[in-house]
Amino acid sequence: MEGLTLSEAEQRYYCDLFSYCDTESTKKVASNGRVLELFRAAQLPNDVVMQIMEQCGATRLGYFGRSQFYIALKLVAVAQSGLPLRVESLNTVKDLPLPRFVMTKNEQESRHTALYSSDADNSASYSGVIPPPPGRIQVKKGSVSHDAVQQRTSTDQQESTSPVVSPQQSPPTSPHTWRKHNRHPSGGNNERPLAGPGPFWAPFSEAQPGSSTSSDPIWSGHSPPPHQENWVSFADTPPTSALLAMHPASVQDQTTVRTVASATTTNEIRRQSSSYDDPWKITDEQRQYYVNQFKTIQPDLNGFIPGSAAKEFFTKSKLPILELSHIWELSDFDKDGALTLDEFCAAFHLVVARKNGYDLPQKLPESLMPKLIDLEDSTEVGEQTGEVGYSSSPAEAPPSKSPSMPSLNQTWPELNQSSEDTAIVHPVPIRMTPSKIHMQEMELKRTGSDHANPTSPLLVKPPELPEENKMSSSVKFTPGNTVNGYSSSDSYTSDPEQIGGTVTRQRSHSGTSPDNTAPPPPPPRPHPSHSRSSSLDMNRSFSVTPGQQQAGVVAYPPAVPPRPQPSQGAGPHVHRPVDAEGLIAHTSTSPQQIPEQPNFADFSQFEAFAVSGVNKEEDDEIETHSEVLQVEKPPDSASSLRVAKADGRVEDKAPANVPTSAGKGTTPLAPPPKPIRRRLKSEDELRPEAEEHTQKTGVIAAVLASQPSIPRSVGKDKKAIQASIRRNKETNTVLARLNSELQQQLKDVLEERISLEVQLEQLRPFSHL
Amino acid sequence: MAVCIAVIAKENYPLYIRSVPTENELKFHYTVHTSLDVVDEKISAMGKALVDQRELYLGLLYPTEDYKVYGYVTNSRVKFVMVVDSSNTALRDNEIRSMFRKLHNSYTDIMCNPFYNPGDRIHSRAFDNMVNSMMMQVC
C-alpha cells in the first residue's frame, strides 16, 4: 500500500470517521451502510467515488480496512479540492483541506429511518422511545455542529456556509465531533479540543433558537455561549461537562441520549464545583438523569436491563472496551449479566467519571453500591420503599439480597441487620432465583439465630416463601414450603411465627440428624398450595357450612380432653410418616391409623360425640372443628404436626366419611387407649423433631381453628362438602406422593445404615488390636 | 497454592496464563501446553457429554519431579490447568477442587460481562485478584 502521511488534524478526523463507520468495531468497514453514505455525502460524482474506492484498494479486499479508509478519505479530499485523483497525489498535495461530507435532506431523513430501524434491531427500547421529530431537529443541530467542527479545523469562511447546510446535516456526523472530543477526555485532556469550537458554536446555537432539546446543550456545552433556554441552564460549561454531553449523544437514541448528555453535563458541572470529598457520590440530579436513562431502556424501574442493551448503551460512550468491561465488573453487583436501576446508575456514574478523567476504582465505592436490589420480579411494590428504608441502615450494602425483602425490611428491620451478620458477607455470584437467596439467608439465619425463638425473623419469611419455595429444590426447605403455603393461604400473622419456629427447628434438625435413631420425619412436603391450603379451605368450608352445628361444635371444645403432649404422641407418628401418610390415603379409621396418629384418636373421641347426635356431614366439620379447636389449645409444639396430619386426615376423611362415619362411630372406644399407649411409647423417640413437627402442625391447626365457623345453609353444605371432597382428594394425592417419597427416603436411610454396619463389621477386627 | 494457573479456550489457545513470577515462566507455559494433550485424552475417554461436577474435575493430569499438574474442564470445553509445586504436600484433592470451583465461578462472572467476547483474552481485574489469591505467595 502506498505510504500515507496525514497531518494531525487529518489523523484525528479520519480516525473519527472510521470509528463512525466502523459500527461493528471490527476494524474494517464494509463498503456499505455508513461508508457509502459518507461517500455520497462527499457530494462527489459517483464515478469519482468508484475511482476512489478502486484506488484505495477496497474493491480488492472487499472491505475498508483502516488504511484503505484513510486513503479513501484523503482521496475524497483531493477530489473535493478539484485535484485529479491520483494515488501519488495523496502524499504530494500539502495542506489539503479535510474532506467535507454534506448530507442532503433526503439522505438525512433516510438515515434517520435507517438509524431508527437499526435502533429497533439493536435496542428496541431505544427506538420505541425516541420521537422522530426531535431527532430531526437534532439532526439539524448535528449538522450544525459538524460543520462547526469542520470549521474548527478548516478555514473560517466555511462558517458562513454552515447555516445553509445545517438543516441538511445528518445526525451521524455529529458523532464525529463528539468522538473527537471524547477521545481527548478519555485521555485526560479535557480542555484542548473544546476551546476551538467554542466560538463557532455560539452562532449556531443562536441560529437555531427554535431547536429544542438536548442537542443544543450538548454543543453549547462546549462553549460559554448560552445554552438553549429549553434546557437546564448550563451556565458554566467546563469542557468535561461537554464531554459528558457527548458521551450519551452517540448515534442512536439521540433525543434521550442528548437529554441525558445535558443532564450529565449539569451533573458534571455540579460535581466538579462541589466538594471532592466523595467523588463517587451521586447527586440527586445525576441520579434523576440516570433514572431517566434507565427508563429509556427499561420502562420498569424495578426491572433489569439485559447485558446486551447495556453494552450497546455504554459502548456509545466510546470508552475502551476494557474499561467498560471493568466498569461492568464493578457495577454488576449480583453478577447476573443484567443491570438493575442501582447497578445501572453506578455504571453510568463510573462512565461519567471515567470520561472526566477519574480513574476507575479497584472496587465499587460504597456510595455506588446498589442499595435497591431488586429481587425476583419487580412485582413487589413495597420493595422499593422497604429497600430504601433499609439502605439507610448499615452500609455493608447487602451483597446478599436479604435487605431487599420488603416484608422483612418493614417488619423486621433488626432482623435484616442480624441476617447480614450471619448472611453472606461478600458478594457471592448468585445466579439463581432470588428465592434461592432467600432460602440461603433463611438457612443462615436459622443456623445463626435462636431456634426456639418463635418470633424470629424467619417467621416473616414464610409468607414470602410460597413463591420461592416453589423454585427451591432443597428438601430441607420443604417444611417451610408447606408451612408457608399453609400460613400464606391463611394469612394469619400469628401462625407464621409458630410455623417459622417449627420450620427452623425442623430444618436444623433435619440437616443435622439424618442418622439419628429414626429418620427424622421430613415435614409434610406436599405442595404448599395443596396440602395445607386445601386443608385450610376444607376446614373453612366445613366450618362455614353447618350453621346449626355451630353450637354443637362450639360445645365440643370444652368437652375435649386435653390433647396429649405432642412429644409423646407425635414422635412415633411423626417419625413414621410413611405409614401415617399411607394411612391417610386410606382414610380409614383403622386401628393402625389411630395408634399412629393420636390425632385420629382424638378424632374418634370427637367422633363419638359427633356420631351420637350429628349426621355424617357434621362429623366432618365437627371433626375438623374439634380438631382445629383442640389444636388450638396446645399451641405449643405438642399437637402441631399431629394436628396438621389430623387435619389432612380430616379432609381425607371427608370424602370417605360416608362409608366410614359409621365405622368411626363404632370405634371410639378402641382408639383412646391406643393413642395413650403410643404416646408413652414414643416418649423416648425423637422429642425435638416431634416438637417441631407438632408445633408446626399445631400452629397450622391453630390457624385452622381460628377460622370463624360461619353458619350456612344446608344447600351450601353440600357444595362445600363437594368442594372439600375435591380438596381432600387433592390432599390425598399429595399425601400419597409424600408417602412414597418418605418411603424412598426410608429405604435410602436403611441402606445407609446397612452399609455403615458393614463397615463397622469390617473395622471390628482392628479394634481388638 | 498454585504455581501457575491457565485458562485454555475450547480451541486450545490460552485465554489466561498467570505464573509465579520468580520461576521461569516459559517452562510453565510449556508444561501447560503439554498437559493439554492429557486433558484431551481424558475428555475423550469420558465419552458422552458428562455434566457432573466430578467429571468436570479431571484430577491429577501428570506429575513430574518438581510439580503436579491438575486439570478441570467446563461444559463448554474451556479448560483450567493448574500447576502446583510438588513440595507442597499439604494440598489435598479437596483443596484443588475448591480452587477449581472458584476459578469456574470467576470465569462465569467474566462471561456474564456483556463486554467480554468469548474467546478474548481475560483482562478482568476481579479474576486477577482471585487468581492472585490462589497463587503461591512468593515475593
Image (cartoon, coloured by chain):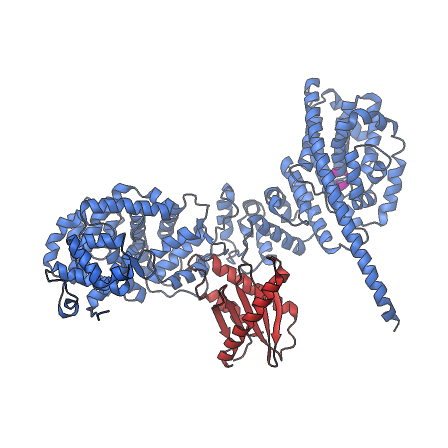
Q: Quadrant of residue A322?
A: bottom left
Residue ID at (49%, 52%): A391
Q: From this viewpoint, is residue A226 visible? A: no
Chain given the colour blue: A
Residue A213 spot, x, y in % from top left: 26, 46
Residue at figure coordinates x 34%, y 44% from the top left = A127
Q: Quadrant of residue B50?
A: bottom right
- Where A195 sits versus B139, above or below? above
Residue A184: image location, x then y, percent: 28, 64
- Does residue B93 belong to the magenta stretch? no
Q: Is residue A642 inside the magenta stretch?
A: yes
- As drawn, B63 above or below A388: below
Report the residue that reaches farthest toward the front: A60
Instruction: Report x, y in % for residue B84.
Output: 58, 75
| Left or right of A64 on screen, residue A731 | right
Please state the extent of the stretch shown in magenta in the rendering. A640-644
Would residue B135 be found to the left or right of residue A234 on screen?
right
The reply to whether residue A715 is in sight is: yes
Quadrant location of the C terminus of chain A? bottom right
Question: Residue A274, relative to residue A709: is it above or below?
Answer: below
The chain painted red is: B
Q: Position of residue A756 (x, y in %)?
A: 80, 60
Q: Residue at x 78, y 39 (%)?
A: A582
| In the image: residue B17, left or right of residue A714 | left
Task: Identify the main secondary structure in magenta.
Answer: helix
Depth check, front residue: A266 or A185: A185
Q: Is residue B93 left or right of residue A320?
A: right
Quarter of the picture containing the N terminus of chain A is bottom left
